[in-house]
Amino acid sequence: MPNTSGGRPSSYGTELADEICERLACGESLRTICADDGMPHRTTVIRWLARYESFCERYELARQIQADVWRDAIYDLANAEPPRDDTGRIDRRAMQHRRNQIGTLQWLAVKHNPRVRGSGA
């Protein structure tokens, strides 16, 4: 049922649940998704997870797929040409930022996908 009050939706609907799961599977965070107009608040989504078993199952699968997307991002970051400064030298600050991105994505990928074991992704 669409929300006509102009506020955030709070009623569960499969189309909205599917959109949330699809966006998660594509790598977006729940925080980012729920910040968009027309999306429920994060606490509403958490309540849906406890209340609707089919949504919980789809959500868990989306999180596993999300971990695969993050592993692809790690690969792309690790194999990209190093960022360079105006002089053509490798930009050390940009490289440190890239290492931080890779480390964060590795940690998230492992935590969000129980099929993955070990300290790396």
Image: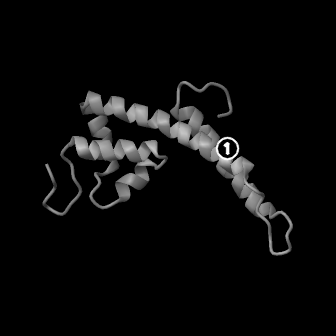
Q: Quadrant of residue 48?
A: top left
| Front position in the image: 69 or 59 | 69
Please provide percent x and percent y for residue 111. 55, 33
Residue at screen point 30% across, 51% down = 41
Please provide percent x and percent y for residue 67. 53, 37
Quadrant location of the C terminus in the rendered image? top right
Position of 80 relative to 14 (above/below): below
Amino acid on which the number 1 mark rests in the picture: Tyr
The residue furthest bottom is 86
Please provide percent x and percent y for residue 108. 57, 39
| Front position in the image: 12 or 27 | 27
Look at mark 1 in the image and give the residue it sits on.
Answer: 75
Please provide percent x and percent y for residue 101. 65, 51
Residue at screen point 55% across, 24% down = 115
Would residue 55 be found to the left or right of residue 110 on screen? Answer: left
Position of 73 relative to 47 (above/below): below
Q: Quadrant of residue 90?
A: bottom right
Total numbered circles = 1
Secondary element type, mark 1:
helix
Q: Residues within 10 Å of mark 1 (few under 14, many from 20)?
A: few
Position of 71 relative to 89 (above/below): above
Residue at screen point 46% across, 50% down = 28
Coloration of the structure image = one colour
Q: Quadrant of residue 7?
A: bottom left
